[in-house]
Amino acid sequence: MKKIALTIIIIIILIAAVAFVFWQRSQKVTPPVQTEVKDDTTSVIDKDLESVDVGDLDKEFEVIDNDLKNL
Amino acid sequence: MKKVVILIVFSLLLVLPVWAQTTTIKQFQNKQTELKNLIQQKRAEFQTRIETKRTELKDKIQVKQEELKQRLQKIKDENKKKIVEKIDQNIDALNEKILNHFSNVLEHLENVLSKISSRADKAEANGRNIEDVKIAIQAAHDAITASRSAIEVQTKKTYTIAVSTENTLRLEVGKTRQALHDDLVKVRETVFTARTAVKKAAAELHKIQGIDELEI
């Protein structure tokens, strides 16, 4: 009788452990992290940094400067 | 009894790594969400402050334009009067346009910084030392904040054109134009500093070996 109880406990623990592992793995299939993963590589970061355009201040003043010439 | 203990230990060995990994992912996700929320909150607060300052400035500009009209009465050439008024309006418009552009650049830099943070967190979760990256990220955040403060200060400004005589008009308007230019150069310097700081953070990230292969 004791042996049967022990076997049942063993089986329950095993099933619970395996179920937990499978459940956790299934939770990880589509976490939001995965969607962000690809755009934080160093190549993407470098590309993003290269595309930073602070602008040409003097060019922005051209209209004012042209008007100034007419004074 | 021995069998049960062995089985519990075996089960724990099976479960613990999975549990630990899930916890790491959740911690990472929470951190990223927190950071995203903080950035959005900061941006919203900044935008509100800018809008308030612009509203306050509108009345000031209107008064200033009326005063300029008064001063221009001593100028006989109608064409020149119109040009001066146009330049006066363009000066304020250009200030707003350039500052908007700088604000957008800072948002762009902040987005890049978020990516650097994300990648650094992944490295940390994989047991890498990211202390230097963290320091560089903080310095970049500080530089962005300082640059936003400079933009705020500049947003409040308007420029008054002095009018003495027709002969000195060009020189006087030129001085006002130069004042705006000099101020915008100073603000631009803060944007450059922010960009350099973000580049430094990216450079620190590059130093971590195999950084792009580290995932959670």
Image (cartoon, coloured by chain):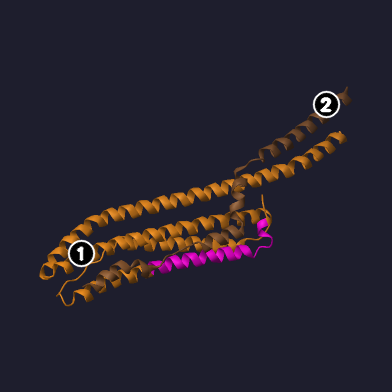
Side of A22 relative to B172 (left or right): right
Residue B170 placement: quadrant: bottom left
**Residue B189 in magenta?**
yes
Specify the colour of chain A. brown
Q: Residue at x 84, y 34 (%)?
A: B4
Mark 1 chain: B
Q: Please state the horizontal and vertical placement of residue B194, each as a whole percent of the image.
A: 47, 64
Give the residues drawn in magenta, as a range: B186-212
Looking at the picture, does residue A42 appear above or below residue B161? above
Side of B160 relative to B208 (left or right): left
Residue beneath disc 1: B85
Tag 1 secondary structure:
helix
Residue type at tag 2: Ile
Mark 2 chain: A
Side of A57 relative to B56 (left or right): right
Q: Please state the horizontal and vertical placement of residue B171, each as a whole percent of the image.
A: 23, 76
Q: CA distance from mark 1 to mark 2?
A: 92 Å
